Image (cartoon, grey):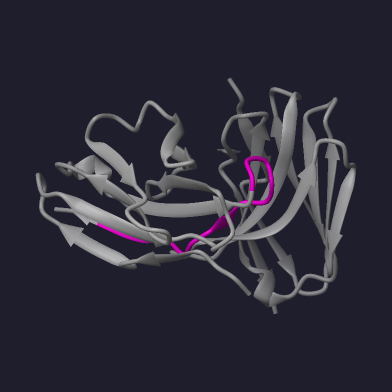
């Protein structure tokens, strides 16, 4: 069964460092998303991406964040200068079209120290 | 602004019981609603998607219902098993927007 894959599963980084989280969405999907979940809190929307551009972003997705689809398969989330409060589980998701079933990856646990 | 709540926050039942998890949302103009399962420290597994035009969806021992006008959805799990132990998340999507998640219900099924 097709699935969304994310790498790495766990990343530890020092405050102020740049991190890139990687995702391979399901191959025939056109919409891509990043969500995050701070420990013990709700899953929160960060950004959606379609046709090589951001279609929507939340207040959390400030200038420190960027997304890219560098080739036909990968979808990345970059955090330019990490802060302690960026520590969270980051989930990538994809859907065939905008309002169909979304499939989530297993997540990348980011720990900023 | 859409807000999603889930009741109860936690539930512990003996194996074999049928159970109901509840999800409420404040803005009834939704496009769809999706139920997910999350195991500790893991990703989100899609269980059921209900479009706004549907009243229920079934998959195996799971049945999800949707009452848009009252802003509610329920997830019914029949004949619960220890392997069903997980956190169950409800997520609501308004048209053209992205998912708003509830806080989840943590389910423990005791052998």
**Percent position of residue A110, x then y:** 28, 56
Q: Is residue A10 left or right of residue A98?
A: left
Is residue B110 visible in the rendered image? The answer is no
Name the quadrant containing residue A60: top left
User: Relative to the observer, which residue lies in front, B105 or A58?
Assistant: A58
Direction right: furthest residue: B55
* Residue B63 sits above or below residue B94 on the image: below
- Residue lying at 24% horizontally and 30% vertically, measured from the top left: A63
Magenta segment, prevailing SS (helix, strand or loop): loop
Q: Is residue A89 left or right of residue B104?
A: left
* Residue B31 sits above or below residue B81 on the image: above
User: Relative to the observer, which residue lies in front, A17 or B78?
Assistant: A17
Q: Quadrant of the N terminus of chain A?
A: bottom right
- Residue lying at 46% horizontally and 41% vertically, measured from the top left: A49
* Residue B34 sits above or below residue B4 on the image: below
User: Relative to the observer, which residue lies in front, A46 or A74?
Assistant: A74
**Percent position of residue A20, x then y:** 24, 54
Is residue A26 visible in the rendered image? The answer is yes
Name the quadrant containing residue A109: bottom left
**Residue segment shown in magenta:** A97-110
**Percent position of residue A94, x then y:** 54, 53
């Amino acid at each position: 069964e097709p699935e969304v894959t994310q790498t790495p599963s766990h990343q530890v980084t020092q405050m102020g460092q740049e991190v890139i989280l990687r995702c391979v969405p399901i191959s025939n999907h056109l919409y891509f998303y990043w969500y995050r979940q701070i420990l013990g809190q709700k899953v929160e929307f960060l950004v959606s991406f379609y046709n090589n551009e951001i279609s929507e972003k939340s207040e959390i997705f400030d200038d420190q964040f960027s997304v890219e689809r560098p080739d036909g398969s990968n979808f990345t989330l970059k955090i330019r200068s990490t802060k302690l409060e960026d520590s969270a589980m980051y989930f990538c998701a994809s859907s065939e079209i905008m309002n169909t079933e979304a499939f989530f990856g297993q997540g990348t646990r980011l720990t900023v120290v | 602004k859409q807000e999603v709540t889930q009741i109860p926050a936690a539930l512990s039942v003996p194996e074999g019981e049928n159970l109901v998890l509840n999800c409420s949302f404040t803005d009834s103009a939704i496009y769809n609603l999706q139920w997910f399962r999350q195991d500790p420290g893991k990703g989100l597994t899609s269980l059921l998607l209900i479009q706004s035009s549907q009243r229920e969806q079934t998959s195996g021992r799971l049945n999800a219902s949707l009452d848009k006008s009252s802003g509610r959805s329920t997830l019914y799990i029949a004949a619960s098993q220890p392997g069903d132990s997980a956190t169950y998340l409800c997520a609501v999507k308004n048209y053209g927007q992205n998912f708003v998640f509830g806080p989840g219900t943590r389910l423990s099924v005791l052998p």
